[in-house]
Image (cartoon, rainbow, N blue to C red):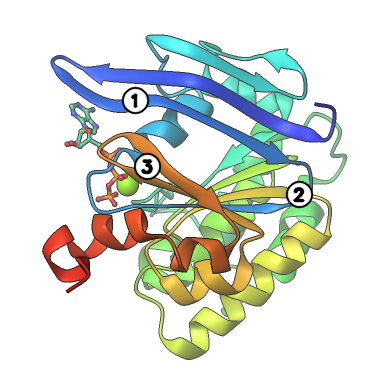
Amino acid sequence: MQDNILVTKDVVKRFGGLVAVKKVSVEVKKGEIFGIIGPNGAGKTTFLNCVSGIYKPEEGEIIYKGESIKGLSSHILCKKGIARTFQIVRSFHKMTALDNVRVAVIFGSDQVHDPDQRARELLEFVNFPLPVDTLASNLNTVQLKYLELARALATDGELLLLDEVAAGLTPGELGDFINLIKKIRDSGVTVISIEHVMKFIMTICDRIAVIHYGEKIAEGTPEEIVANQLVMEAYLGKEHTAKK
Ligand SMILES: Nc1ncnc2c1ncn2[C@@H]1O[C@H](COP(=O)(O)OP(=O)(O)OP(=O)(O)O)[C@@H](O)[C@H]1O
Ligand SMILES: [Mg+2]
């Protein structure tokens, strides 16, 4: 369908004998915030790694803007508009925040005339809380997340993949992050967000897919997901949710 920016069909990714992703199919609409939740080790990051070109799935299909992208490398997908953050934040520690973003601008976008100016705009857009010449090695986890987001946006992506950006935030920081992700979506970027923080997921997502042992066990609006028996069992265990 035309209003889907990303479609995956029966994606399978194995590590030796372990099937980390089992026939996962999703349809992500242009302009939505699509959440992916599931217990630790469920296969969420592995699935996202298949979409962003870090892994090539053994089976299935991945279609981005109507074109098959299965097996294309991350840097080609980045040029096509798929940007991502990492569960473990990656930055160049010996460089300033500004230089970190400038490198991403130069790498990710061919059309920028003034990378320095663009990098400053991006840091301002994400409300980076410190002077832009602060060394990345001096940033705390939360400040690094802002930097990571600015770097991801530097590639002018149309589809932004987030892996646990809300982990470890205080309630106040979480509110700021929720507003920021909404602002990113409102700027025209479709967002897929893996998250454990329920407030983030429930407040921000249009739809949510739940992955458990590599399989998609549910999909729906936040309200549908909290009311889903299978999801409750996946999180709490059957014995806690069985009707007495
Ligand atoms: N490179 C790898 N080699 C072998 N096994 C892997 C590799 N990456 C992930 N796995 C395994 O695949 C399964 C899914 O891992 P994955 O990291 O995708 O889970 P996740 O849902 O992102 O979990 P978390 O919420 O803890 O981040 C786990 O059993 C994990 O140990
Ligand atoms: Mg993960």
Spatial CA distance of label 3 from label 1 is 11 Å
Instruction: Note whether residue 126 is visible.
Output: no
- Nearer to the camera, 217 or 184: 217
Q: Residues within 10 Å of mark 1 (few under 14, many from 20)?
A: many
Across and down, in percent, residue 2 comes to 85, 28
Is ligand 1 closer than 8 angstroms to the Cβ of mark 3?
yes
- Please tell me the numbered disc located at residue 189: 2
- Earlier-in-chain disc, 2 versus 1: 1
Instruction: Relative to 126, say whether 45 is above or below.
Output: above
- Earlier-in-chain disc, 3 versus 1: 1
Left or right of residue 93, residue 133 in this image: right
Q: Looking at this rendering, what residue extends furthest in the front direction?
A: 244
- Earlier-in-chain disc, 2 versus 3: 3
Across and down, in percent, residue 47 comes to 41, 32
Across and down, in percent, residue 222 comes to 56, 65
Q: Residues within 10 Å of mark 3 (few under 14, many from 20)?
A: many
Residue denoted by label 3: 44
Of the 4 image quadrants, the one containing the N terminus is top right
Residue denoted by label 1: 22
Instruction: Relative to 67, say whether 50 is above or below.
Output: below
- Mark 2 is on which residue type? Val
- Nearer to the camera, 32 or 139: 32
Secondary structure under the numbered disc 2 in the rendered image: loop
Spatial CA distance of label 2 from label 1 is 28 Å
Left or right of residue 145, residue 130 in this image: right
Secondary structure under the numbered disc 1 in the rendered image: strand
Image-quadrant location for residue 106: top right
